[in-house]
Image (spheres, helix red, strand yellow):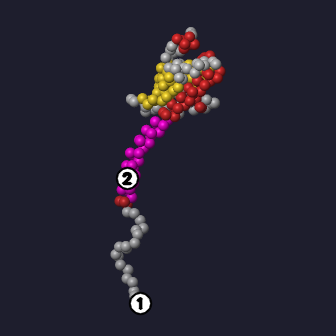
């Protein structure tokens, strides 16, 4: 019969635990990787929100064009500079749209949502600026209506499928911008990234 003696020699089998130094080293590597990854993910999400906002505006422009063709009336995409609200309606409703825009913007500022959520840019995205070309036809349509740059801005869409030439800039909280460029002759819009 053999007696086995207990010795203090290390075992050759698997270890049952990690040392404190090993755990600290692994945690340090995880923190380093996370510190590099978080800014990249944040930037990517910001760009995605800008793209999503530009897509919403392009869809609204397409809707305004189609509505103008269907109804035979001049339609408008109304947007609020320095705000995040927009809407498509007949141009003749300019004064009503200004009231709706003001009311909706104050509701949004207080985090109260109404039926116009589809007409809002994603969180953190706003209309930075816009330029709308005024030609003879739009001047005739606008008539005596004065549109100042601080109030609601209309972009006109005509029953023949054309529109005003326009560029609308969207901006996020990090001051990244994209532009939605509307070509008046065709009524088609495209998104262009704007470098700082």
Residue farthest to the left, as pictured: 9
Quarter of the image where one finds residue 110: top right
Q: What stretch is highlighted in magenta?
A: 23-49
Q: Is residue 40 visible?
A: yes
Residue 135, x across and y down, in percent: 51, 13
Q: Can residue 82 be seen in this view?
A: no
Above or below — where is 40 with respect to 23? Answer: above
Above or below — where is 37 with respect to 68? Answer: below
Instruction: Name the residue tied to disc 2.
Output: 29
Quarter of the image where one finds residue 154: top right
Q: Identify the residue shown where x is 39% and y is 30%.
A: 195
The disc label shown at residue 1, or none: 1
Q: Which of 69 and 128 is in front in this view?
A: 69
Residue 118, x across and y down, in percent: 59, 31
The disc label shown at residue 73, or none: none
Q: Identify the residue shown where x is 56% and y is 23%.
A: 77
Gap in angstroms between the C-alphas marked 1 and 2? 52 Å
Q: How many marks?
A: 2
């Amino acid at each position: 019969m053999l007696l086995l003696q207990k010795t203090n020699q290390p075992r050759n089998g698997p270890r049952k635990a990690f040392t404190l130094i090993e755990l600290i080293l692994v945690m340090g590597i995880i923190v380093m990787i996370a510190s590099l990854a978080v800014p990249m993910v944040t930037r990517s999400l910001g760009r995605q929100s800008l793209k999503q906002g530009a897509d919403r505006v392009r869809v609204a422009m397409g809707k305004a064009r189609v509505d103008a063709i269907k109804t035979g009336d001049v339609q408008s995409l109304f947007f609020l500079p320095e705000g995040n609200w927009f809407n498509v309606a007949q141009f003749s409703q300019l004064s009503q749209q200004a009231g709706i825009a003001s009311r909706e913007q104050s509701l949004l500022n207080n985090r109260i949502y109404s039926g116009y959520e589809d007409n809002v840019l994603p969180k953190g995205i706003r209309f930075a600026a816009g330029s709308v070309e005024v030609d003879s036809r739009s001047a005739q349509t606008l008539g005596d209506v004065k549109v100042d740059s601080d109030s609601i801005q209309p972009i006109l869409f005509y029953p023949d499928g054309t529109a005003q030439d326009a560029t609308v800039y969207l901006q996020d909280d990090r001051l990244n911008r994209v532009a939605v460029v509307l070509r008046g002759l065709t009524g088609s819009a495209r998104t262009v990234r704007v470098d700082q």
